[in-house]
Amino acid sequence: MPHSRFARSSFLRWLLAGPGAFVLAVLLMAFLPLVLPAGAGGVNHMVLPALLFPLLWAILAIAPVMSLDGRKTGLVYGGLCVAAIIIIGLSIVF
Amino acid sequence: MALIAEQTKRLINLHGWLAVSLSILLYTVMLTGTVVVFSHEIGHWAEGKTGEAGPLSKPLNRHFQRLAAQVPVELQEDIIVGEGPNGTLRLFFGSSQVRIEAGRGIFGRQFLVNPSSGHVVKAQAGLLEDLGTGLDERALEDFLVDLHVRLHVPGRWGLYITGTLGVVMLILAITGVLIHRNIFRDFFVTERPGDRVVSIRDRHNLAGVWSLPFAILLSFTGAFLSFAVSLGLPILAMVAFGGDQEAALEAVIGVPVIEEPQPANLANLDTIVAEAEKIAKAPITVINIHRGGRADAIVETFHAQAPGALRGTSLEFKGPSGAFLGHTHLVGTQASVGSTLAELTAPLHFGDFAGKTSRLVWAALGAAMTFTIVSGMQLWMRRRHDDPFWNCAGRVFSISTWVVPLAMLGAVYGYFLTRLTSDPSLWTARAFLLVLCASLLVAVWWWAAPVKEQNKRYGRILAVGVLLLPILRIQTGGLSIGEALVTSSIDVLFIDALCVLVGAAVWTAIRSKTGQLSVT
C-alpha cells in the first residue's frame, strides 16, 4: 500500500526522532516511578527510570527513522505523550 | 534483521549526519576519556611526591579533638577529615544551616594541619565549595576529569552536553550495527591498499566493529552518569516529591532519621579508622562526620578499592560509641537491584575495576573509538571531496583533531610551569584556553598550506611536546627516574613511559602516514 506523502516526509521523522524522542523519553522517565515496584531497598522505582533514560532516548530516536509509516509512529508517540502527561498530572494532584 | 533499502538509507543518513554535526565534541569527549582512564596515575605522576604514607594513615584523633573544641557546635553539622595539600591533614567543620552573604552552601572553618606535629599550617573560613580541597597537586587530574565530564562548561549545562553526546554515541553504535551487513567479517577485515574510499571504509569498519560493545557500554554508562543528578533527580523530585529536591535526595541517598540532639563526645577516631580499615580491607580516603557533637552523630568512612573489588566501599559507625553500623549504599539504605546497578556504572565507565590491566584495555578501546570518529569523518569528507563546503569542513575537523590534544598538552605545561610559584589550579585551565586560542590563530595562519603539510607541522609540535613532558616534570620539582625507581613510584614511571611511547608513535605516524591522517 503506498504511503502518503505526509507519512514519508523527512520533517515529520526529524520531529519525532529529534525533539519528540527527547520529550517522550523524559515523560517516560517521569512516568516509570509511578508503575515500577520500589523493591526491598525502596529505591528501584527511582533508580531504574534514570538508568533506562539514555536507552529510551536512543531507541525512541531510532524508531521513527526505521518506521515504514511515519504517521503511525507519530500517533503512537503522541498517544504515549498524552497518556504519560495525564497519569503524571493525576499523581501530582492526588 | 533484514532492512529494506529505504530504511537502510535513512539509518545511514542518521548515522552520518548525527556524527558529522557533533564530530568535534564527540572527538573531544572520547579523546579526553581515553586520557582520563589514567587520571589517578596522572595525578600521582604530577604530584611529584615519593610513595610516603598519607596523613590519614597517622594518628589523627588528638588533632581532631583539639580543633573540634575550638569550633562552635553549630559548625559541626558536617565535618570532613581528609588529605590536604603537601601531606597536610585537612579538617573542615561546617553547616548548611548557616546563611551568609556569600551565598548558599555549606559554610565553615577549614584547618590544614601537620599530621605529625599537630601544627596548624593554614586556617580559613568560607563556603566549602570555595575553600575546596586545597590540593593544588591534583589540579591537573581534576582539570582533565572535568574536561571529560563536563567539557569545562560550568554547572549542569556541561553535564547536559556530555550526557547528550553519550546518547548520540549510543545511537551511532546501534545504527552502526543495523546498517552493517557483514559485521562478523569486519572483525578480520584488512585495509585495502591505495588510500582510496574503500580503504578508509575498511579502516572505519574495523575500528568501529572492535570497539562496538565498548562503545555501547561507555556511551550508556556515561550518559547515565551525566544525566542521573542533572536531569533525573529534578524530574523524579517533581513527580514523586512535589518538586522537593532535598526530600528526593534524602530518599535516594537514605539519610538516617534518628533524632538525638543532646550533646555527646565523639568516640576515638583512631579506633574507628583502625576498625574501618580492617572491615573494608582497604585504606581510608576520606571521613565524613554527620551531626558532630550530638548523640546521633554518624561517622562515615570512604575507602579505596580492596584487592579484587569492583569499587571502593563506605562504612558507617555510630559517633559516640564508635559501633559499626554497616556498609552504606550508593542509593538508599539497603541493598537493592537499583543501587547495585548504579554502583556498577562508574567502574564500568572508568575501567578501574582490575587495576592497570583493565585501564589499559579501556584506554586501548577508547583510542579505537576515537579513531572510529576520525575515520568516519575521513570517509564522509572523502566522498564529498569535490564540494567546496565539505572540503572546508574537512579542514576544520582535521585542524580540530590536532588542536584539542595540543590544548590538553598546553594544560599539562601550564600546570608544571606554575606549580612551584603560582596557582596551578587556575593556570592549568588558563593554559588550556590560551593554547586552544593560539592553535586556532596558527590554524588561520596556516590555512593556505596543504593539509598534509599542516598535519606534519601539528604532529611534530605534539610529538616533541609530549616527549619533553618527563623532562619538564623532573625540572619542576618532580621525582627523578632514580628516585621513582628507589621509592617504587610505579605511576610516575608508567606515565613517563607512556609519554615517550605516545610521542614516538605520533612522530612515526607523521613520518610514515601523513596522507592517512588527512581528513580531506
Image: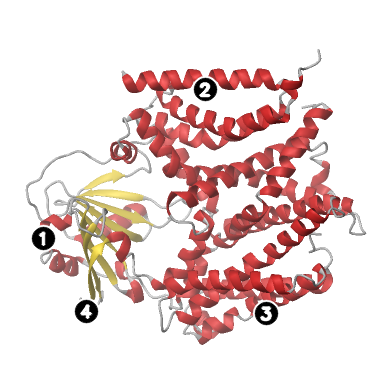
Mark 4 on the same chain as mark 3:
yes
In this rendered view, identify the residue nearer to me: A36 or B520: B520
Which chain does the numbered disc 3 sit on?
Answer: B
Residue B89 in view: yes
Q: In front: mark 3 or mark 2?
A: 2
On-image quarter of the C terminus of chain A? top left
Q: Which residue is mark 3?
A: B464
Disc 3 marks a residue whose amino acid type is Val
Q: SS for tag 1? A: loop
**x 11%, y 60%: residue:** B72
Q: Which residue is mark 1?
A: B72
Q: Which residue is mark 2?
A: A81
Q: In front: mark 4 or mark 1?
A: 1
Could you say where residue B99 lies in the image, as x and y percent from the top left?
19, 54
Residue B367: quarter of image: bottom right
**x 43%, y 78%: residue:** B50
Q: SS for tag 4? A: loop
Q: Specify whether B127 is left or right of B185.
A: left
Q: Which residue is mark 4?
A: B117
Q: SS for tag 3? A: helix
Which chain does the numbered disc 4 sit on?
Answer: B
Give the crowd class for mark 3: few <14, some 14-19, many >=20 residues within 10 Å: some
Disc 1 marks a residue whose amino acid type is Pro
Q: In front: mark 1 or mark 2?
A: 2
Residue B310 in view: no
Disc 4 marks a residue whose amino acid type is Ser
Determine whether B296 is above or below A84 in the image.
Answer: below
Q: SS for tag 2? A: helix
Residue at the outermost left position = B262
On-image quarter of the N terminus of chain A? top right
